Image (tube, grey):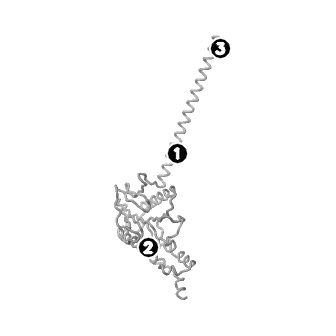
């Protein structure tokens, strides 16, 4: 009983917030688990986090999330996406990738991803690097994500315009193998999309078609609307021109009929 009470009073360390070990989680009641989840911070300063990387970094994350979110919504595929969401594996230091993806789960909003609560880990993590410690994204995160069993991990170095990807060769594997690009594209089996570097940005492709972010979608929609308006205006002008020509023909016919009548010819008389 005393041991049970000690477990029920589990609370995260503010300086190193972690979800409880799985055996502790399993021993808690549902109410106790909810209290633990509520106590895990959704906003924090990680001691090993890099410095803020400014607008270019923020825009890259936003464009990636927007293009994926719109695409999966349009094709009605249930996949949870988030950016910088705290991820809590049992008794592991919390981390918050620039982008995560989890297949076939509810897509409602979350304050964190607690593996014990969700009953599964994340499927894909992606980091975008601009400044600070490059080894965090290209080395330490690779080792950690593989050890945690995350099927795919990608790192995009904005400054060098370099994309790298890794994949677990088997479900129980805990060491990544590099994803070998084909024609400058890296295939993600989780997203079922290609990733590529296009100029200075990360781009996703479905076949030959690029996925568009919100601004690109608005621009394309505006262009389509403008073209539709121009076509409608052209059709209206053509209709007006046809109406004017019909009126001119009618007036010419009236003048010809009047001239025939002056000559004593009835233009309305039936032909003999």
Question: Where residue 34 sits: x, y (%)?
Answer: 55, 76
Question: Where residue 236 sits: x, y (%)?
Answer: 56, 36
What residue occupies the far top of the structure in this picture? Answer: 264
Residue in front for this viewpoint, 46 or 243 = 243
Q: Are dots 2 and 1 in contact, CB under 8 Å?
A: no
Vertical placement of 120 versus 76: above or below?
below
Q: Locate residue 269: give its quadrant.
A: top right
Q: Residues within 10 Å of mark 3 (few under 14, many from 20)?
A: few
Of circles 2 and 1, the one toward us is 1
**Total of numbered circles in the picture?**
3
Which of the two labelled residues, at mark 2 and mark 1, occupies the earlier sequence position?
2
Name the secondary structure under disc 3: loop
The circle on residue 46 is 2
Question: Where residue 229 sits: x, y (%)?
Answer: 53, 42
Question: Where residue 68 sits: x, y (%)?
Answer: 47, 58
Of circles 1 and 3, the one toward us is 3
Q: CA distance from mark 1 to mark 3?
A: 54 Å
Q: Which residue is mark 3?
A: 266
Of circles 3 and 2, the one toward us is 3
In the picture, which quadrant includes the N terminus? bottom right
Name the secondary structure under disc 2: loop
Name the secondary structure under disc 1: helix
In the picture, which quadrant includes the C terminus? top right
Q: Are dots 3 and 2 in contact, CB under 8 Å?
A: no
> In the drawing, does residue 84 fall left or right of residue 245?
left
Vertical placement of 168 versus 34: above or below?
above
Q: Locate residue 240: give its quadrant.
A: top right
Q: Which residue is mark 1?
A: 225
């Amino acid at each position: 009983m005393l041991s049970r009470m000690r477990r029920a009073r589990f609370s995260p360390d503010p300086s190193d917030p972690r979800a409880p070990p799985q055996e502790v989680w399993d021993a808690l009641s549902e109410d106790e688990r909810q209290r633990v989840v509520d106590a895990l911070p959704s906003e924090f300063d990680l001691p090993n986090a890099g410095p803020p990387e400014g607008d270019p970094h923020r825009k890259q994350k936003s464009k990636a999330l927007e293009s994926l979110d719109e695409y999966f919504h349009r094709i009605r595929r249930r996949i949870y996406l988030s950016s910088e969401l705290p991820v809590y594996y049992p008794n592991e230091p919390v981390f918050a990738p620039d982008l995560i993806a989890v297949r076939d789960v509810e897509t409602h909003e979350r304050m964190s991803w607690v593996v014990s609560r969700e009953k599964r880990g994340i499927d894909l993590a992606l980091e975008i690097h601009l400044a600070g410690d490059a080894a965090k994204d290209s080395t330490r995160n690779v080792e950690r994500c593989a050890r945690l069993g995350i099927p795919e991990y990608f790192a995009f170095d904005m400054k060098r315009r370099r994309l790298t990807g890794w994949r677990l060769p088997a479900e129980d594997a805990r060491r990544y193998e590099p994803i070998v690009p084909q024609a400058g594209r890296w295939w993600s089996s989780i997203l079922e999309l290609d990733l590529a570097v296009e100029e200075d940005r990360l781009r996703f492709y479905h076949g030959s078609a690029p996925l568009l972010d919100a601004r690109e979608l608005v621009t394309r929609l505006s262009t389509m609307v403008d073209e539709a308006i121009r076509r409608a205006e052209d059709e209206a002008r053509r209709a007006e021109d046809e109406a004017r020509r019909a009126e001119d023909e009618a007036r010419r016919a009236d003048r010809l009929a009047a001239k025939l009548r002056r000559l004593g010819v009835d233009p309305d008389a039936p032909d003999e």
